[in-house]
Image (cartoon, helix red, strand yellow):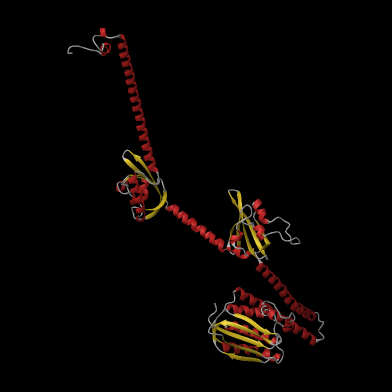
Amino acid sequence: MPGSSTTFGDALTRPAFGTPADAPPLLLAELQARVDEQSAQLEAIVAELEHQSALRREVEADLRASEARFRSLTASAHDAIVTADSQGRIVFWNPGAENIFGYTADEILGRPLTDLLAPDERPVYRRVLLLAALTGELADNAPLREARGLRKSGIAFPLELSLASWGTSDGMLIGAIIRDITERKQAMEDLARVSQHNELILKSAGEGIVGLDLDGRATFVNPAAADTTGFAGEELIGRSLHAVLHPLLPSGPTCRTEPCPLGQTLADCAARSTQHELFWRKDGSRFPVEVSIRSICFEDTIVGAVVTFRDITERLAMEKVKDEFVSVVSHELRTPLTSIRASLGLLAGGVLAAAPDKAQRMLDIAVGNADRLIRLVNDILDIERLESGRADLHPRLCEVAGLVQRAAEEMRGMAQAAGVPLQVGATSGQLVADPDRVLQVLTNLVSNAIKFSAAGQSVELRGGPNGADEIVFAVRDCGRGIAADKLEAIFERFHQVDASDSREKGGTGLGLAICKSIVRQHGGRVWAESTPGEGSTFFVALPVGSPA
């Protein structure tokens, strides 16, 4: 009522019905309790609101700090970090993206995310983003894929792309982390190229190369190792190299008693090499090898070994030939030198002073042996120059008839002295060759035919075309002939059909070897056909064109 004043306490003490004097005491107490309870609840609500406000301020501060950290991280990241809305339009663009793609934020914000991809990549990702817009969720969250990007300059490049989606109060957002992998791809290509190059080197190596694990089992076998041993590479992989190629030999003087170097190297990491080991082929035959074994260490730990071996069968054969050559040359040099020394010793001592005829005979012997030595040295030097490639050819167009006639004229005196008729058969054709070298071959063959023919037995020399590309010369005699098993060997150095021929016929044993070398230099071939007791025919086939 106007002019009246009522306090909150008065309202609490005033009875609900009638005057306060009429209110029951219990009702007044109940009302007071309710008021107190509501006051407490109100105070609790106020306190909770203040607490929530404080929490909200903390969360907002954390969000601002997180946003600052996020922006700091994205600003310093080398990768492109891009955010797009549910329609696939770019709404966030970090400096890393600008560095990779070349667009500034002002140029790219609002454009489709697929504009960052090469044209042929875009349809796939358009479908992914459309499906995400329809469902509100990316179908395959955070897939890491390789794709091709497109820079502002229009240059395509390889990239690695990871997509993720999350919901916000403003709708779904799609995040993309993009990494330029151009350098990585180039490095991988370079590594693959180097690896392929190294593999080609191993496969092309002439020596056998086998990789072993710690148990001595083969892990790598190159083609040379497979070809040399007769095993396919797959047959050796996983098997013990020692057990397959280098087992203990049967008991006897050749039995291996010392430890195998393969196992020793795997045990102590020391490199080893042996000049003469024996390996077994798949067919059961043995062959000599030169072996080198080196361990493979990784971070000071032995992880295996590599075995390199070379078949030295040919080398040992060459060493044998060399030894035989040295032995023969020594003998061939010693014999005439001994004779010369004896003859000169007699003359110098005056023993033959009273016998001029004998003295002259000794001089003739010395001169003959000196000439033999000169021929031997010249032939050795000649064949060495030919086989080492230091003897140059001077090819020019030659008439076959002219070469045959010159050879016959040079050997006519020797044939008459031996009583051997020298005949010239049919000749025709032309070829490009070194005439002096061809003449050397022909005279050498005619000389041999005369030496091994008896008086009255004729020797024939002829030459002519054998087809359009070849000229064949033939020297036929009617002498004692050559056994079939000797026809190939007679072209070797110092080889004589009969050991007494060198002394009786006066040859050095190098003539046919020289002929073979000259013919080979011309790109031709030489061979002999013979029937023992009926004579022999030597053939020389030379290409019509210029020798290589």
Can I make out residue 150 in this image? no
Locate the C terminus by quadrant: bottom right
In the rendering, at what x and y percent does residue 430 appear?
54, 86
Q: Quadrant of residue 515?
A: bottom right
Q: Looking at this view, is 343 or 381 the one in front?
A: 381
Q: Residue at x 32, y 38 (%)?
A: 169
Q: Residue at x 24, y 11 (%)?
A: 17
Tell me if residue 163 comes above or below residue 257 in the rendering. above
Q: Looking at this view, is 532 or 351 the one in front?
A: 532
In the rendering, at what x and y percent does residue 409 appear?
63, 90
Tell me if residue 166 comes above or below residue 477 in the rendering. above
Can I make out residue 152 in this image? yes
In the rendering, at what x and y percent does residue 107 appear?
30, 48
Tell me if residue 267 comes above or below residue 370 in the rendering. above
Tell me if residue 181 comes above or below residue 327 in the rendering. above
In the picture, measured across the screen, residue 240 lies left or right of residue 111, that is right
